[in-house]
Amino acid sequence: MFGTDWNNKPLSELTARIVIAHHGRFRVELPALQGAAREVYACHRQRDFARLAPLPGLLFRLGDELERHMRREELTIFPAITALERAAEREEPVVGNRCAGSLISATLSEHDDILDLLAEARQMTGNYEPPPNADQPYRVLLHRFEALDRDLNLHIVLENDSIFSRALSLARRR
Ligand SMILES: [Fe+2]
Ligand SMILES: [Fe+2]
């Protein structure tokens, strides 16, 4: 889906792709993982309490933080970026470009918070490596969590490098 032309596409197209492909997938995957983590914990807490006990809580924190973040992007940041791009295309000054710039900077720091939670997840799960006695649901949980971690990292790289950096240049335009 994301070819080498990612940096040459209009920002409005990229943000629409992000919402459909990435945000849509996270909204399905997070609740599924939260449910799976609760079930695996209920089955295995006697044998692997230290590793499993904090996982459901971490997934709920990640889900809450991510949902707030995605809603802010969809309702505020991405429309502001589209407005910046339209104004630049028409060579018009943008009203509120400073405000858009500071919104984007705040969003970059939310990305860091999400990356910190993922680092916590890797540390908590031993890099998603199942213990030798793990059954299939336990292995699937860690495998899906690892895939989510990878997707979230890719999503943040795409937003930071291909959308927000370009939008910040537009916001600083005179
Ligand atoms: Fe996003
Ligand atoms: Fe984001």
Image: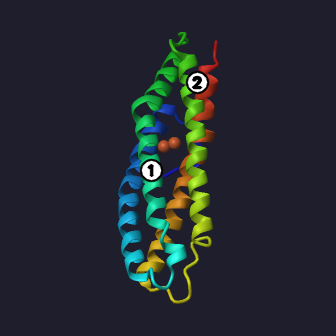
The answer to which image quadrant residue 70 occupies is top left
- Is residue 41 visible to the viewer in this orientation of the structure? yes
Q: Amino acid at mark 2?
A: Gly
Is tag 1's residue or tag 2's residue first in the polypeptide sequence? 1
Density class for disc 2 (Cα within 10 Å; few <14, some 14-19, many ≥20) is: many
Which label number is shown at residue 101?
2
Q: Secondary structure at mark 1?
A: helix
Q: Is residue 108 left or right of residue 24?
A: right
Expressed as whole percent of the image width and height from the top left, the position of residue 55 reads: 48, 66
Expressed as whole percent of the image width and height from the top left, the position of residue 1 reads: 48, 52
Expressed as whole percent of the image width and height from the top left, the position of residue 148 reads: 49, 61
Expressed as whole percent of the image width and height from the top left, the position of residue 124 reads: 58, 68
Q: Is mark 1 within 8 Å of ligand 1?
A: yes
Residue that mark 1 sits on: 22
Density class for disc 1 (Cα within 10 Å; few <14, some 14-19, many ≥20) is: some
Q: Residue at x 48, y 71 (%)?
A: 53
* Residue found at the far bottom of this picture: 133
Relative to 126, does residue 149 appear above or below in the rendering? Answer: above
- Is residue 17 visible to the viewer in this orientation of the structure? no
Q: Secondary structure at mark 2?
A: helix
Q: Residue at x 53, y 54 (%)?
A: 152
Disc 1 versus disc 2: distance between alpha carbons?
Answer: 23 Å
Q: Is residue 65 left or right of residue 39?
A: right
Q: Residue at x 46, y 53 (%)?
A: 61
Which label number is shown at residue 12?
none
For the residue pair 87 and 134, the one nearer the viewer reads as 134
Q: Residue at x 50, y 12 (%)?
A: 95
Kindly report which numbered mark, 1 or 2, lies closer to the viewer in this rendering: 2
Color theme of the render: rainbow
Q: Amino acid at mark 1?
A: His
Q: Is mark 2 within 8 Å of ligand 2?
A: no
